Amino acid sequence: MNQPKKPLPVWADIILIPLINILLALFVAGIIIYLIGENPFEALKILIYGAFGYDEAIGYTLYYTTNFIFTGLAVAIAFHANLFNIGGEGQAYIGGLGVAIVMITLDGYLPFWALLPLAILVAMLFGALWAAIPAYLQAYRGSHIVITTIMFNFIAANLMVYLLVNVFIVPGSMSPESRIFADNAHLPFMHEILAWFDIQVASTPLNISFLIALLFCVFLWLFIWHTRWGYELRTVGFSESAATYAGINSKKVVMMTMIISGALAGMVGINEIMGVHHKLLLDFVAGYGFTGIAVALMGRNHPVGIIVASLLFGALYQGGAELTFDMPNVSREMVVAIQGLIILFSGALTYMSKPWLERFFHIFSHSKPTKMEA
Amino acid sequence: MHSDLSPMAIDLRGISKAFGSVQANKNVNFSVPKGTIHGIVGENGAGKSTLMSILYGFYEADSGEIYISGEKTKIQSSTDAIKAGIGMVHQHFMLVDNFTALENIMLGAESGSILSSSIADAAKELTRLESEFGLRIDKDAQTDTLPVGQLQRVEILKALYRGAEILILDEPTGVLTPQEADQLFNILRSLKERGVTVIIITHKLREIMALTDNVSIMRQGEIVSNLKTSQTNREELAELMVGRKVRMDIDKAPATPKERLLEIKNLSVKDEYGINRLDSVSFDIHAGEILGIAGVSGNGQSELLEVLSGIRDCSEGKVVINAETITPTKHANPEQIRKAKISHVPEDRLKRGLVPAFSASESSLLGYHKHRVFNGLFLTNSSAIKTHCMDLMDAFDVRPKDPSLKSANFSGGNQQKLILAREMEQKPKVLLVGQPTRGVDIGAIEFIHKQIVTMRDSGSAILLVSGELDELMSLSDRILVMFEGRIVGEMMANEADETTLGLMMANALGKSDEKKEDISI
């Protein structure tokens, strides 16, 4: 029955389990690739080369990574308060809307250095607002946040279709997109920045939002573990009754947490809208919000883990795209399936291998005292 | 103790069990003759529960052998244990609340797949058991409507229904009034007369002396002694348990009550169903006084603590607690209460008192995390937090002295000491204490009691809620008894005795006749 097992060593929990999950996913993916008549090892080689093999590949990988860091952090901070924010997708989408509104109204008037902080602020504000409504419903009205955040994804998607078709569309154009922002409203690309230092790299969508994302990781780490607000957040996450005892208002903590979470997801809008597309368009979030859940799970809700997991998913996105080019039998859908397997094994089945590992460690640590006796 | 003629009901030989580096049981040998009551005593973490869990198949021993009625038996699961005729009554009842007593008893042991015929069979068997063992219950009552004493009988019948000839009871009297406990003992004695072997785990030495034939004392995973109960006494047992001489009584001077610090007038609290959990409660506590609240758990003591500590709002009445006023329209939250120099040691240390997943230093901050000393403008002051925790650990001898260790990994006694240290270090004017020594070992109890008395002598008013009558009588200066949310009795501690308090706790002290019936079932 309920065998109390010794907890796993920290390193096994943080490194070994995610690694095993990825290997399991790759193993199953390998079988699929073998079944459609391709060499799985060759495929893995192409995937890794396609993600890290040359400067353009690395640029794209890190560009995807940026989005995953933002959404991963968003999901992670909510997890620390024992909240499951599935609405990263919608919050990111609305965040992008905020960026676009700032750019379209002000790109003729303000310089870049004024636009950037304003855009970040508004992106976070819009994302936060989109998360604050489900948070309010959870905290004060008892609607489950999982349900409401999912619903808000749909509302966001439909709202954006409406706005793009009826409000932001360029008159006379057939595609539901806003006008392109003026040059002063573009985030500098990394290849441009590196060019200032005489380093020539291939041009990729990678822009300075990547550095902003890394900065946010530090901020969030400090916030969660080294501020009194983070302390309250974690107390509520671990034990609501202890929080009540300590005089912590859990309702306020739920609001605060979701507002930060939504703000982080909204930052995807900076990377995508201000950094890459320079216009508002449909479906630019492309599942980053959902994948953020897997990123947070795999990264154990810790900023360092999230950076590593984001890099992995970035590599999968980029390397997967290369794979479809180089292996005609491997279709785009096949790559999505591989991503799905990784999400399945490291997200939904995160702890599948844990009992086995615990038993392994148990037997291992067990044999020591017996030896000493002998 | 061994007799070669009739085999022992239980004979454990060389049982060892380790969890990681912790040796929970070390080469344990002990045997229980058939048809006797055997007590196992020991401090928390002495390995009593592990040993019984091995016997009941929850854990498997690393080495050693189990003989049941002389036959070597391998017990790998509770199913094996039940098959071998072992039944267990857990400390926390394992019953489905919205089932009837009968349904609970037959759950998992139905005679067939058709429910109605199973119920009929079970009812018949239950009637037989009831008459054989003289154990009456209302078998059609929904379980959550039954009092705890009855629930325990349901648990015992559950084991007997499965054919148990050996009954293990884990801390069975924790939730009972003294009278209910006496009734339980009568039941156990009559089970013994009918040949059932009973093993009882408890930390109450009084019960060991009153009930058992033999007693085994465990310390640090080992059986340190097997004794005939008739040839020992409480002092010897306590000394064997702790490994040194223990003072059972508390050194304390008579109280010298001074100014009034807590005043409660007609305080009532309604729960979400509109039922009065507290019903017009009025009393005062003065500086330099320990007021004990006795009562079977669930009679409003928890609600009282929650109102006074700001966790719960009251529906009627008025509380003036060290110049902070609480009324139904003027709530106080725990933060304000703390600011008014009132500290609260909660009843449930794992749910409220600390966060098991937090490090000790984080838990030692609970409730005080906004204090200026621990915070800069934005970031917390990690070194101040660590120093603070070290100071608390020094002052209250918390072991191991490691602020970064997870709170859950401390023993119950050390967790409690950490919480007491945290709350007492604030030098409160009023200290609210719930169950200060529940699940705490004897050595630590002595220390905790001393600290509470010291706090009183330094001029604090102390409200003590406890389920242990011994503790209430020796620690309090004055005792109030609660029953169904009301105060039904008051005694000076030096005039109190267990019988009177017990009767008051059941509200049966020559008052209403219908209440008397309750406890005579």
Image: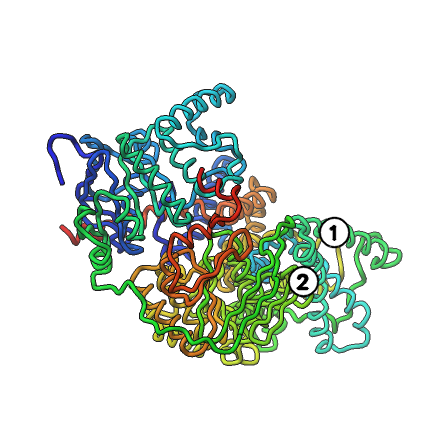
Residue B163 placement (x, y as % from top left)? 33, 28
Q: How is the image coloured?
A: rainbow
In the image, which disc is placed on residue A209?
none
Residue B22 placement (x, y as % from top left)? 27, 55
Asked whether residue A267 appears in the rendered view, the answer is no
Asked whether residue A169 appears in the rendered view, the answer is yes
Of B191 and A248, nearer the camera is B191
Residue A162 placement (x, y as % from top left)? 82, 52
**Amino acid type shown at disc 1:** Ala
Gap between marks 2 and 1 measured at Cα: 14 Å
- Residue at image position (48%, 32%) is B138
Q: Is residue B475 above or below residue B7?
A: below
**Amino acid type shown at disc 2:** Gly
- Which chain is disc 2 placed on? A
Q: Which residue is mark 2?
A: A266
Q: Which residue is mark 1?
A: A157
